[in-house]
Amino acid sequence: METDANKEHIERETLQLVLEEFAQEQKTNNQHIEALIIAINNIGNKIDVSIKEQKAEKNVLESLDIKPIEAILQKSFLDIKFMIGRQPKSIVRKFQILLFPEQDAKLFYKIVFGRWFLWLAIMIALNNLYSWGIHYSDNSKEIEIRQIQNDRIRKAWEYLYVNNDKETKKLMKKAYANSVESK
C-alpha cells in the first residue's frame, strides 16, 4: 500500500514538474511570438511608409534596398521554425514488465542478488537457530523429567532400605550390585 501511495505521489510530483516546465516554455514562446508580431508590425509599418514615400516620389527611380527587410523576415521565419520545433511533444507512457533491465544490468544484478543472498543467509541462520532452540528445549525437558523419575526411584529405594530388616537390605545391596555389573 505504501509503495503504491509513494508511486502515485512521485507520479503527481513528476507530472506537476513537467506541467510547470511546459507552462514556463509556453510563456517564453508567447513572449517570442509577441516580439515577432511587434517586429512584423514594425516591418509592415516600414513597408507602408516606404510605399507612401514611393508613391509620393514617383519621379525618383531609385530601387529600394530590401536586403535588410529580407534578412529580418528570414530571421523571423527561422525563429518561428525554431519555436515550432521546440513545441512540446506528446508524452508516450510505456508500461513494461521487464525480467532483465534495459540499462545497467551489472548494477541491477549486484544490488538484487546481493540482497537476495543476504536475506537467504539470514533466513537459513534464523531457521537453524530456531531448530537448535527447539532441540535444546526438548533435551532440557527430557533431562528434567528423567531427573525427577530418578529422584523418585532413589527416594523409594532409600525409604525401603531404611524401613526394612537386614535380610531385605542384603537383597537390595545384591540387586544394586547386579544392576551395576549388568550395565
Image (cartoon, helix red, strand yellow):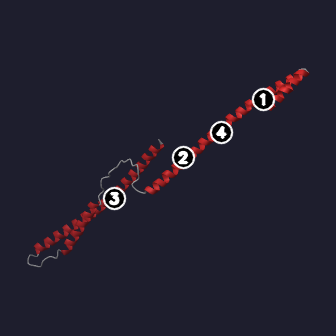
Q: CA distance from mark 1 to mark 4?
A: 26 Å
Q: As shown in the figure, which amino acid type bears the numbered disc 2?
A: Leu
| Residue under numbered circle 1 | 150
Residue 116: % across, % down = 51, 48
User: Which callout, 3 or 4, points at the residue further toward the start of the chain?
Assistant: 3
Q: As shown in the figure, which amino acid type bears the numbered disc 4?
A: Gly
Q: CA distance from mark 2 to mark 1?
A: 45 Å
Q: CA distance from mark 3 to mark 4?
A: 67 Å
User: Which callout, 1 or 3, points at the residue further toward the start of the chain?
Assistant: 3
Nearest to the eye among marks 2 and 3: give it. Answer: 2
Q: CA distance from mark 1 to mark 3?
A: 92 Å
Secondary structure of the residue carrying tag 4 is helix
Q: As shown in the figure, which amino acid type bears the numbered disc 3?
A: Glu
| Residue under numbered circle 3 | 25
- Residue 28 position by quadrant: bottom left
| Residue under numbered circle 4 | 133
Classify mark 4: residues with Cα within 10 Å, few (<14), some (14-19) or many (20+). few
Q: Marks 1 and 2: in contact by CB < 8 Å?
A: no
Q: Marks 4 and 3: in contact by CB < 8 Å?
A: no
Q: Is residue 163 visible?
A: no
User: Which callout, 2 or 4, points at the residue further toward the start of the chain?
Assistant: 2
Is residue 166 placed above or below 53 in the rendered structure? Answer: above
What's the mark number on residue 56? none
Classify mark 1: residues with Cα within 10 Å, few (<14), some (14-19) or many (20+). few
Q: CA distance from mark 2 to mark 4?
A: 20 Å
What's the mark number on residue 120? 2
User: Which callout, 2 or 3, points at the residue further toward the start of the chain?
Assistant: 3
Secondary structure of the residue carrying tag 3 is helix
User: Which callout, 1 or 4, points at the residue further toward the start of the chain?
Assistant: 4
Q: Residue at x 54, y 46 (%)?
A: 120
